């Protein structure tokens, strides 16, 4: 469904009128397009004195053809200045060496001049060390302070900009390139204000143009909307896709599978024999499992029937639990696999009339956090993705006033697209993304709900 306010805000007349009235004018976000070569299409500025900057610098020229440093002679790069330098499309700041209150001023010193020279839809990544990994309480305090800074900066950027904080654990430097390729590119257009932890993981992406080549992926709820976008994106990145949906969606499912060169599987995931049938349909095993299937049956709790409650929990939470365990026990989901659970910001912030839905989505987040350590022994990562307001057939049916509120109540001032969720899932499915596990990544434009 089209966003008329966004379209008006990006017209010549709209910009003048909204500017005169002092109303917000969200910029239409840049998204990844086929044929693009480099993650960053423009100038990138790197700064900071910590060791992570050196690790980031090692891959910079694979990310952009215009890299600059904040200081003379740093990393052998030309120095950027606000007076003579180009507009900036990406910023990387290594804050991992900050260990005191006094040193936090380095954040202002780096970002203040750069903020006046940002291009449209810029992407910012701040690098740090997880506070819980530090023995010095003052250093841990300073590193925890980065979260407040990054989230506040995300709300100040405007112009379609995003900000992320990456806490890099010991050995996590080896997977920094994959994270930067995602968070500094339009693939993360609707991801902002996030705090991600990367640990050590040995697998590497062999070909960045097809990072999922040789992988087999199963996507549930794949016939339309977000599920279809996930299947398309995984196939674009080289995966062999198996698309699953309910028998009633068989025609659309088969058509999409044929277009993507994949396979379709019409199956009710809540059926008693669903696990056995799924294992039988995957004799060659599976590398990527995406639990996207989900339903809503909204009512306030006072009017919530047993059927409305149970149907949502069975589809959204119980089925992923049962099927994942069955695939693991049968050895169908191979070692070093990737499991992605589609949660929701409703599972984080709650939502009126959605106690059943919020319970199911919060349960998925809990599943990822609780199960990840055990699965990590097999090299399997398990993460949750929590979309915010995404433009789908489901949100198009929401009453106008509520729909408009959902679109505007985030730092980017607009709804996301199914592609935004799909790009996030595709990154989490990459071999090197095993460095991130047991976490929830919001795709919500830095929503004000549950922030």
Image (tube, rainbow, N blue to C red):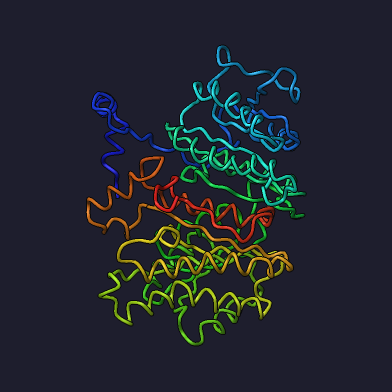
| Residue lying furthest bottom | 272
In the figure, residue 25 lies in which quadrant?
top left
In percent of width and height, residue 110 lies at 60, 25
Reply above or below: 339 against 318. Answer: above
Res 167 visible: yes
Left or right: 12, with 180 as reference point: left
Count the labels in the image.
0
The reply to whether residue 176 is visible in this rendering is no
The residue depicted at 72 percent of the width and 38 percent of the height is 52
Q: Which residue shows up at 50% across the image and 60% down it?
A: 231
From the viewer's perspective, is 424 left or right of 138? left
Depicted 28 relative to depicted 112: above or below: below
358 relative to 283, above or below: above
Where residue 184 sits: x, y (%)? 57, 38
Identify the residue at horizontal 39%, vertical 51% (top origin).
449
Is 140 in front, or is 88? 140
In the image, is residue 117 above or below residue 408?
above
Residue 424 at x, y = what percent? 53, 52
Front position in the image: 12 or 217: 12
Task: Name the spot of residue 164 as percent of width and height, x first.
Answer: 56, 42
**Residue sticking out furthest to the top:** 83
Q: Nearer the viewer, residue 264 or 15?
A: 15
Quarter of the rendering containing residue 181: top right
């Amino acid at each position: 469904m089209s966003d008329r306010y966004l379209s008006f805000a990006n017209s010549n007349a709209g910009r003048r009128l909204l500017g005169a009235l002092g109303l917000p004018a969200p910029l239409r976000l840049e998204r990844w397009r086929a044929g693009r070569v480099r993650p960053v299409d423009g100038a990138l500025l790197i700064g900071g004195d910590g060791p992570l900057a050196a690790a980031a610098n090692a891959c910079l020229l694979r990310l952009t053809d215009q890299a600059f440093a904040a200081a003379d002679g740093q990393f052998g790069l030309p120095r950027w200045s606000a007076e003579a330098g180009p507009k900036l499309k990406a910023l990387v700041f290594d804050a991992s060496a900050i260990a005191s209150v006094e040193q936090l001023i380095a954040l202002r010193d780096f970002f203040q001049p750069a903020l006046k020279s940002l291009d449209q839809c810029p992407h910012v990544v701040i690098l740090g060390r997880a506070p819980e990994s530090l023995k010095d309480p003052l250093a841990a305090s300073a590193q925890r302070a980065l979260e407040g800074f990054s989230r506040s900066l995300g709300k100040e950027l405007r112009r379609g900009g995003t900000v992320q904080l990456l806490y890099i654990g010991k050995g996590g430097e080896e997977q920094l390139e994959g994270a930067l390729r995602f968070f500094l590119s339009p693939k993360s257009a609707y991801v902002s204000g996030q705090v991600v932890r990367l640990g050590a993981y040995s697998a590497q992406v062999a070909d960045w143009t097809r990072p999922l080549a040789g992988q087999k992926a199963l996507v549930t709820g794949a016939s339309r909307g977000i599920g279809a976008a996930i299947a398309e994106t995984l196939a674009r990145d080289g995966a062999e896709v198996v698309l699953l949906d309910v028998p009633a969606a068989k025609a659309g499912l088969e058509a999409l599978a044929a277009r993507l060169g994949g396979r379709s599987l019409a199956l009710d995931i809540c059926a008693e024999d669903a696990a056995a049938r799924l294992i039988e349909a995957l004799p060659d095993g599976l590398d990527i499992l995406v639990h996207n299937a989900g339903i809503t049956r909204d009512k306030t709790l006072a009017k919530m029937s047993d059927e409305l409650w149970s149907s949502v929990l069975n589809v959204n939470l119980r089925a992923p639990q049962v099927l994942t365990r069955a695939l693991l026990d049968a050895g169908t989901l191979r070692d070093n696999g990737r499991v992605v659970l589609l949660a929701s910001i409703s599972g984080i912030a709650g939502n009126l009339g959605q106690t059943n839905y919020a319970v199911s989505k919060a349960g998925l987040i809990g599943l990822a956090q609780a199960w990840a350590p055990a699965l990590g022994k097999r090299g399997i990562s398990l993460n949750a993705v929590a979309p915010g307001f995404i433009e789908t057939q489901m949100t198009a049916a929401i009453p106008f006033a509520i729909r408009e509120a959902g679109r505007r109540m985030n730092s980017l001032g607009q709804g996301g697209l199914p592609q935004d969720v799909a790009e996030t899932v595709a990154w989490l499915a990459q071999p090197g993304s095993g460095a991130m596990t047991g976490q929830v990544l919001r795709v919500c434009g830095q929503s004000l709900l549950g922030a």
